[in-house]
Structure formats: structure tokens, C-alpha cells
Image: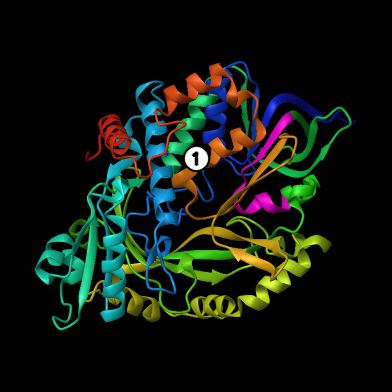
Amino acid sequence: MSHEPIKTKSDVILIGAGIMSATLGILLKELEPDLTITVLERLDAAARESSNAWNNAGTGHSAFCELNYTIETEDGSIDTKKAKNIASQYEISREFWSYLVEDIQVLPAKDFIHSVPHYSFVWGEENVSFLKKRYEALRKEPLFQAIQYSEDPNVLSEWMPLVMSGRDPKQRVAGTKMELGTDVDFGTLTRSIFKYLESLPGVTISYYEHVKDLEREKNGLWNLTATNYLSHETEHHEANFVFIGAGGGSLPLLEKSDIPEAEGFGGFPVSGQWLRCKNREVIEKHFAKVYGKANVGSPPMSVPHLDTRIMNGQKELLFGPYAGFTTKFLKKGSYFDLAKSLELGNIFPMLSAGMHNLPLTKYLIGQALQSHEDRIEALREYLPEVKSEDWELVVAGQRVQIIKADEEEGGVLEFGTEVVAASDGSLAALLGASPGASTSVSIMLEVLADCFPQKIKTETWQKKLKKMIPSFGESFIGNESLVKESRKRSAKALELIG
């Protein structure tokens, strides 16, 4: 007996139940309450991949302490543009999360966000010189006015007691401190947003849905073909607009869309690992995110950090990330993901990027071959009195770094996120990784601007966006009064240090 394939039709389809789809979904539903939205997720619940707290490589990214966001130029000056942009994007996220907490009461603030100070810590003459120049450059910007700097071991011991305990007193060290730092459990936030969305009329969330193909029909609608892992049946889903927010799985689906804008994109997968502290006594002695400087020859994504996380209400301590080579695009993906992503249009850019990034390949192989003691030695630079038995290795999520076609280089490897949108606004996909979740609101505002250009100009959308994000249409950079006003408001709503 044959069954007719399941067919659904909605205004919007969101592929992937992570923080990006959750953010876009709730923005659209607040802007257009009558929209019908279908969410398709291949796993059994939301936030199982990169948005999961244990898989997310960085939480609360605000450029306060991440040294890879401030580059020392050839003339010795510090380029702060990226740090300023990320810091301002994080303030936008805080404003929107305040709206979720106060206005529509998606979840209590204490369930997903906490004040955790952010530190940068370096040693050696060259690195100390860099950090001081970074501090001098950043403190002129209102977003970073609260930054503190010290080379005094006594002060640093007050800031980071475990980091300084047992350290050689002759070693030259320096640190910066931002008390305004935060930690975010994006898994809890994502699941709460989807729970709220599911309670609204016109929203359907389907799990165990593996989207295998998508194509544009003559009537302008997108037709998605999916297989349900439970029923093993083929399903068809139609929509006017599709957002591909499937993490590492976005690239293969973007390629299948055949939009011209997807031409030349490739992906380089990288697996992540952490050392997780098992000793509760050690965990309780450290309360901070401490970021260092990547070793010479290491990629920007490898910046080591000793990271206090609060997950499901419990304090944890991680160190890493340690990278590894993989051919999977998702943690629960296939080893054939990389091979399947190869097309005529991206083979040359990917080979070119590979040739230009041989040190990265060497680095990843070296990371994959490390022993437990090798990893502990890296940690010892941050915790001189570390005990090997207190730590265990855990596998984090997958990253797929963007490879783009380039006229001069043939192909270049990008270490960021990028929205790829169809010219008619009917489809958008998010590629890349860091800073990712922390700037999800700004990224989804970019999707709205690219894909709903007329709607976003209307008085209705403008007023609603201003209500959800009070700074909408303004810039935090160089605007001291806006920074102070916004932080005061969001700190109160989110129960954070002001």
C-alpha cells in the first residue's frame, strides 16, 4: 500500500534548530505575527550541535579579552576595528535578550546569562608589549573604557589567583580585566526560544528531519525534500523564504540551492576538544574567562583560554580549544561530508586555500596526535600547579571554516561568519563559525536587511525593531552616552554587573 508523500506549505522554513534559526524565527514572528514558520531539525531536539553549551567553542564573545580580534600591524600599531565591531554587536544581543526576558518573558535571565569577568593574560617581553599597546588603543573607545591593565604580580594574583599561583616570579607577565564580561548558555537560550515559538499559532517544529535537497519551483516557491528518520518517509515542504542555519551542514544545502551567490564557496572542517576539570575544588577557585595569545604559527581559532562556564545552573571549568582534523561537517555528521561538498565551482578555490594554508594542516595533524600529557603541558602555562588527574578530554562541536574564491589567491580561508543571500531575498544561509552565537542578533538583522529590504524600511518594522533593540539604527562605536544608557538598561534586565 503506497502512501502519498507528506506535504507542508508555510511562509518561512528554518533549517536547523540552533541559536541562529531561533533568533531569526522569533524576530520574524514578533515583526509579522501572522507568518507561518516551519522549523526542520535533523536531530531529536534543539541546540544539539554548535549551540549546545558543551559544544560551543566560545560564550559571551564581546572582544573584551579575545586577543585575535586586535591585530598588530606592520607599523606596530593595533588595529581595533574588529574588536569594536564585535563589542558593539554583543551590546545589540544584550538588548534583544533583555526584550526576551522582560517584555515577552521567554525565560528568566539567570537561566542563561551571568556576569563573569574577562581577562587577557600574557607573558614574555614581546607579548607584554603587545598587550599594553592593545590596552592603550582600546581604552579610548567607550565600549572598552572600563578596561584595566596591570603588570603587577600582586594585582594579577588578586584577579586570577589560580593562574598566578606557583608561577616563576621572574617571568614578566601582564593582564587586562573587564569586569563587565558575561557567560552565556546558548543551549538553554535556544531551547527556551523554540519552546516559546512552538506555543505561538502558525509555528511548527519538526525533529528527525533530514533535508536532502531544495529547489526553486516555477511559481517562485522553494521545495524542500526531506526524510524523516523515524517514519523513513519522504516529505516535501514548500515556503516563500528559506533560511539555512544548519551550522556545518549549511554549505552542502547552500550548494544544492544552485543560487549564483553560492558559487565558489567551500568549507574546511575542524573538530574541537576541551580539557574539562573534574575537581570541584579547583573549579570553585576560578571564576573568569582568561584568554591568552595563540602561539606563533597557530590559526586565530586556536586562541587558548581557561574558561568558567555556567551550564544548566552549574559552574564548570574548561581549557582549550584543542583542534583536530576531521572530514565531518557536523559532530553527528558523516565522514563523507567534505568529499560530498566538492563541486566544479569550488575545487580550485579549496585546493588553492589548502596550498596557502599548509601550516594549518600541519597544526591540525599535530593537535590530533597530542597525548593527554601534551595537552596538560599546554594548560600548565596557564595553571602552573595543574594536576593531570583533575582533567579529562571532552569533544566539542565542529567548525567549518569558509573558503571563498579569490581572483588573486584562487581561494582564501576565512575565519568568521558570512551571510550568503539570493539576490531576490528568497533564501539565505549562514556559513562560518566565530564569533557566531554571541553576535547572532546582529547577523540575523543582516538577514532581514538582505532578504526583506522593503519590509525593514516600513514604519511598522522600524518601530518594532526599535522596541526590541533600542539602539537599532544607531552605532555604539564612539558613542559614550549610548553605550552607558544601553548597558545600564540591559544590565538591569539581565541581572548583570552594570
In this view, 344 is above or below 101: below
Q: Residue at x 73, y 48 (%)?
A: 253
Q: Quadrant of residue 96?
A: top left
Q: Residue at x 62, y 54 (%)?
A: 248
Q: Residue furthest front?
A: 75
Residue 421 visible? The answer is yes
In the rendered view, does 419 fall on the left or right side of 241?
left
SS for callout 1: helix
How many labels, in total?
Answer: 1
- Measuring from the top left, give residue 87's x and y in whole percent: 38, 48
Residue at image coords 33%, 47%? 183
Whether residue 395 is situated above or below residue 227 in the rendered picture: below
Q: Is residue 225 magenta?
A: no
Give 290 or 308, whichever is nearer the viewer.
Answer: 290
> Where's the C terminus, which quadrant?
top left
Q: Within 10 angstroms of label 1, few (less than 14), some, or many (20 or more) residues? A: many
Magenta-drawn segment: 240-253
